[in-house]
Image (tube, rainbow, N blue to C red):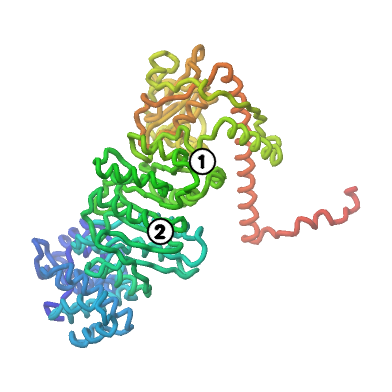
Amino acid sequence: MNEAEALRMTLSDVAALAQVQRPVVSMWRKRSAASEHPFPEPTALDGGRELFEADHIAAWLAATGRGNNPEARNDVAAFARMPGTAAGGAPENTFDALTALLTLKAMTGDSVGQLSPDELLDVADECDPDDTFLYSELEAQSTSLTSTANFADRLVDSAYNAAAAFEQLLAARFRAGLREHSDTALTESAVGLVAAAAVELAATLGGNSVFADSTRGGSDLLMGVAHAAGESAPVTFLTADDDGGGAGRLVRRRLRVHGVDGGQIRVDASGEFAVHGPVVHVAQYPSPGQPGMDAVQVLSAVEHLVLQMDDQQRAVVIAPARVLCDVPLATGAAGLRSGLLRSGRVRAIVRLPQGLLRSKPREAQALWVLGPSFAEVPIAERWTMVADLSSRVLAEDVSQDLISDIVASMGDRATIRAHSFRFARLVQTRLLLANRKSLATAPSHGSAQSPSGAEAALRVEELERMLQTTRPEQSGEVAVLTRDPNAKARPVSVQDLITSGNLKYIKGNRLEDADLTPRGGTRVLGPAELLNPHTAPHRHLSLMDFAASNPSGRLTEPGDVVFCTSPRPAALVDREGGSAVVFPARVLRLDAGDPGGLLPDVVAADINVLPAADKSWRQWRLRRVPEAQRTQLAASLARLQHGQNLARERLKRFEELATLITDGVAGGSLTLTDPSTKLAEPQTEGTQ
């Protein structure tokens, strides 16, 4: 292999190939200097960084057995610098040519490294006669085309096929210094969330699924959709024509290398376009082809998307939270956002956690989910689903439940009321427009999720009948009447209640984890128990150890509300008392003589519905219960909680039964029979 064709690696590339941390490679290099197999010497410099010949590195790893990748010799091309980039060439040109060669290899099924530059251009002309996705990229390589083609063959050998090699190149966009392709790169969890939501929304439209991405250079989301949809049903992709942009040509190469020959959307110079029929749009802003979009440009692009939609279409848009839901927003952008909310098509607003944009891990993203506008619903009564996942990790269960909430948000009032939302709240759109905080934390008072007194009374009666029918012993025996909503007491802040003496604030105790045990002694309550009250393992502490380490420490009393603010506000009522509260959890204790209309269960409920970002606990506003209703509400809630406990115990027995028969039958110790045969068996003598 000549100097131009040599594959080179940095020490960071070596670490990635060997599947170790970067400092480990430096340690190998230092300790092996005087050994039988010294670490290979650098063969070039690139901007002050040492470059090592990739084949020498692979041979050294094989000879020494270093690292955690037994296939390092076969995988080395996937971690090497692209030809040209390691020698000071333009990484964008090499990247474009390499992706073009991989696409050509996928389309022809033949090796490209054995062809001369003229032969490669002839084959490219046959595969791309109109030069819409790869011919120009190969023509621009000229003299270095042969070395790039050889590298393409080696890359496919390492990745097993051209499509996988193409994806490896895109995954390595940060290592290769390809800013155009890395500035807007999302994490896998973000792409997976958008794609899974799009696939679920498409399933509600019926027929063959059609997905469209009208952004410049967008393809990550479409590839995510392809992965989420699988091969169970035919899928059609539509992308922007973007004839003059390199990002658009990359999208077409990416679809071709995966065997997808999608259609195109004609987008004019102003950004307007039209797509007809049932379709789910996916879009990321700023887009890969326009990474410098500001708030006005992002919202204008969303506006073009909304204007061409009808009630057969859905859309999932991901963009910075500062544009889609946060405040403040510049006047021009704020007007655009308000106009989009008034359109009625913004069905869901979800603020996502930080870390989803690779190049800006501290910038939070947000989702807008667009759908039917329900034109028959008066503007003043329209609603939008909002959710704040700022403090959540996008684990599988979180994503699945959020998607379930999103799909439900597309429905009418009846559909929404039938769905149990985990993360979302329904807020009247007029309240969103008037809100001065993040749209994802808009107040829900008067929203579609807060029914009128008459509606609530009817629903209470319906639920009571259902509980009586299914499990009479678990019924709460609740009866209600409607009352004037204007007669309710005004909520009061925690600080005002502390000042007036209705509430007392007690700090949590500093406890060492080593002193805690799973059983025996005094119960311990901390954030873990507050966030997962029914599933968190119990923790206990010796009362003597507690007294020794906290001479002034105090245990809870029955009815104390234990709360925390991080990672999100959460609270529970300690009904038995006698628990040790571990900091950062704290206690709010109601004054027994004058609780000021407070009820422990209502206080805990008010805290548990607060947005994750609301950490100012002294400013939390708590609802008060009329004195004549406090005792009756407490008794009703106690009966309902007893029914809930019985239901949980019943669920545990179901789970235990399922485990026993699964293990018994699979392990060969049990045999299942038809339960009806027990009734038909004749009684034997001695049992009568």
Q: Secondary structure at mark 2?
A: helix
Relative to 244, say whether 294 is above or below.
Answer: above
Circle 1 sits on which residue? 535
* Residue 127 in sight: yes
Q: Is residue 671 above or below residue 128?
A: above
Name the residue at 16% across, 62% down: 29
- Give the residue drawn at x 38%, y 49%: 368
Residue 648 position within the rendered picture, expressed as x and y whole percent measured from the top left: 60, 40
Q: Secondary structure at mark 1?
A: loop
Classify residue 370 as left or right of residue 91. Answer: right
In front here: 274 or 495?
A: 274
Q: Pick the residue in front: 23 or 6.
A: 6
| Horizontal and vertical percent position of residue 658 | 63, 52
Residue designated by label 2: 195
* Residue for point 27% across, 73% down: 73
319 relative position to 24: left or right = right
Q: Quadrant of residue 451?
A: top right
Q: Quadrant of residue 554?
A: top left
Q: Quadrant of residue 144?
A: bottom left
